Image (spheres, rainbow, N blue to C red):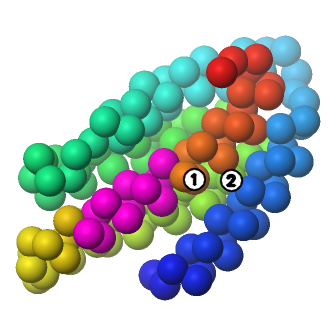
Amino acid sequence: MSTTSRTTRLSVAIAVAATLATAGCGVTTQRELCRQYADVTTKAQQLRQLDTTANSPEFVQKLFADFGTEVDQFQSTTEGSLDVAISGLRSALADARADVAAAANQADAQVQALLQEDVHNIRTQWALVQQAVEAQCGTK
């Protein structure tokens, strides 16, 4: 995926996340959203601490997949209010998984550079989701 399309997707996600921060929802739905958010945040912490140079591609791939599963569960509680922001996150995860899968065909330095960029993009997209949810859940 080109940097230009990633940048465009990021710009769109930022604009949408800013408007989503004020979106409201029912009390029960909001509780569930906030509970699921806490769960997915735990997985996101693992990504923040990820050192792609110190872990095998298989470990990194599993971490990306596990985070993707948590994002899917979280999205089911958002009632569509975060679909655009989560779509950007999912796209960044898909790019990362594709890069890990292709890693066997590339030199180690190339793989590390790709994975570091992927982790950065995932963190950036996750920050957009966080910004929108924290306004609803009253967390920081």
Residue depicted at x 9% and y 72%: 108
Location of the N terminus by quadrant is bottom left
SS assignment at label 1 = helix
Q: Which residue is mark 2?
A: 85
Q: Is residue 89 left or right of residue 28?
A: left
Q: Is residue 23 left or right of residue 101?
A: right
Residue 72 seen by the camera: no
Q: Quadrant of residue 127?
A: top right
Is the residue marked by circle 1 packed among few (<14), some (14-19), or many (20+) residues within 10 Å?
A: many
Q: Compared with residue 27, is residue 98 higher up or lower down, i.e. above or below? A: below
Q: Quadrant of residue 133?
A: top right
Residue depicted at x 75% and y 66%: 12
Give me the disc on residue 30. none
Q: Which amino acid type is shown beneath numbered disc 2? A: Ala
x and y percentages locating residue 135 in the rendered image: 79, 28
Residue depicted at x 66% and y 47%: 128
Q: Main secondary structure of the magenta part?
A: helix
Tag in front: 2 or 1? 1
SS assignment at label 2 = helix
Of 68 and 89, nearer the camera is: 89
Of 89 and 71, nearer the camera is: 89
Q: Which residues are magenta?
A: 113-123
Q: Quadrant of residue 15?
A: bottom right
Q: Which residue is mark 1?
A: 125
- Mark 2 vs 1, N-terminal side: 2
Location of the C terminus by quadrant is top right
Q: Which amino acid type is shown beneath numbered disc 1? A: Gln
Q: How many marks do you count on the picture?
A: 2
Asked if disc 2 and disc 1 are in contact, CB closer than 8 Å, the reply is yes
Q: Is residue 136 left or right of residue 68?
A: right
The residues tagged by marks 2 and 1 sit, at their Cα atoms, a distance apart of 7 Å
